[in-house]
Image (cartoon, rainbow, N blue to C red):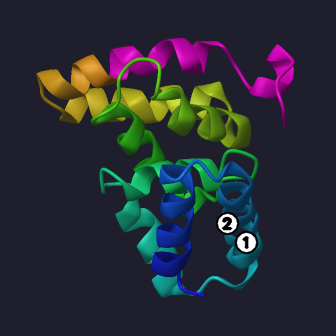
């Protein structure tokens, strides 16, 4: 099954409130990561700039270690186009996988290169970075 197909099935399940099926699609996606090709990783990276697909990627990595190749795109997805509460779905997997310091460095890099919208987005992400990894806060690893 392609990433587009997995995304479409997951999205349909979410929209029709079939949450068990949505969770099954996420499990399938996590299992598929082991066999990803370069094109598959490119799809995931590109999905992080798509207003709908980025949520699918965030949920795939909610309970899965985030690979370094998606780190910058995931932080950028948090900074751009998320409100202060929802940016957590992108920041938490980054902090859990790479630590607060690495995420703060990436946010600082984006802030230095970005405009006022990036500055605002970075500020919204900071509480989720400063909270530390979920396992240290008693959350799910």
Q: Magenta region: which residues?
A: 122-141
Instruction: Judge from the rendering whether residue 29 lies leftward or rightward of residue 76; answer left or right.
Output: right
Residue found at the far left of this picture: 115
Q: Quadrant of the C terminus?
A: top right
Residue depicted at 40% across the width and 17% down the height:
84
* Residue at 84%, 19% in the rendered image: 136
| Numbered badge on residue 124 | none
Secondary structure of the residue carrying numbered label 1:
helix
Q: In the rendered view, tell whether residue 87 sits above or below residue 55.
A: above
Residue shown at 65%/57% (left/top)?
A: 22
Is 14 located above or below residue 104 in the figure?
A: below
User: Does the CB distance between marks 2 and 1 fall below 8 Å?
Assistant: yes
Left or right for 30, reference 77: right
The residue at which mark 1 appears reads as: 28
| Pick the front one: 59 or 39 | 59
Expressed as whole percent of the image width and height from the top left, the position of residue 85 reads: 47, 19
- Residue located at (49% from left, 62% from top): 12
Residue 66 part of the magenta-drawn span: no
The kind of secondary structure element at disc 2 is: helix
**Magenta-span inclusion, residue 124:** yes
Structural crowding at the residue carrying mark 1, measured as other residues with C-alpha within 10 Å and reported as few (<14), some (14–19) or many (≥20): some
User: Pointer 2: what residue?
Assistant: 25
Judged left or right of residue 53, residue 59 is: right
Q: Is residue 74 left or right of residue 110?
A: right
Q: Nearer the viewer, residue 115 or 42?
A: 42
Comparing 122 with 18, the one in front is: 18
Query: Could you give the CA–CA distance between mark 2 and mark 1, rounded to whole angstroms?
Result: 5 Å
Q: Quadrant of residue 125?
A: top left
Q: Position of residue 139 (x, y in %)?
A: 82, 24
Q: Quadrant of the N terminus?
A: bottom right
């Amino acid at each position: 099954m392609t990433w587009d197909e997995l995304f479409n099935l997951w999205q349909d399940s979410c929209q029709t409130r079939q949450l068990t099926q949505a969770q099954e699609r996420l499990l399938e996606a996590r299992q598929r990561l082991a066999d990803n090709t370069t094109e598959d990783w490119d799809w995931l990276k590109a999905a992080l700039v798509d207003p709908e697909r980025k949520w699918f990627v965030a949920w795939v990595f909610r309970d899965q270690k985030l690979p370094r190749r998606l780190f910058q795109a995931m932080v950028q997805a948090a900074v751009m186009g998320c409100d202060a509460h929802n940016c957590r779905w992108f920041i938490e997997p980054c902090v859990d996988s790479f630590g607060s310091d690495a995420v703060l460095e990436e946010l600082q890099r984006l802030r230095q290169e970005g405009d006022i919208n990036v500055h605002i987005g970075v500020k919204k992400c900071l509480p989720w970075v400063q909270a530390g990894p979920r396992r240290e806060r008693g959350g799910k690893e």
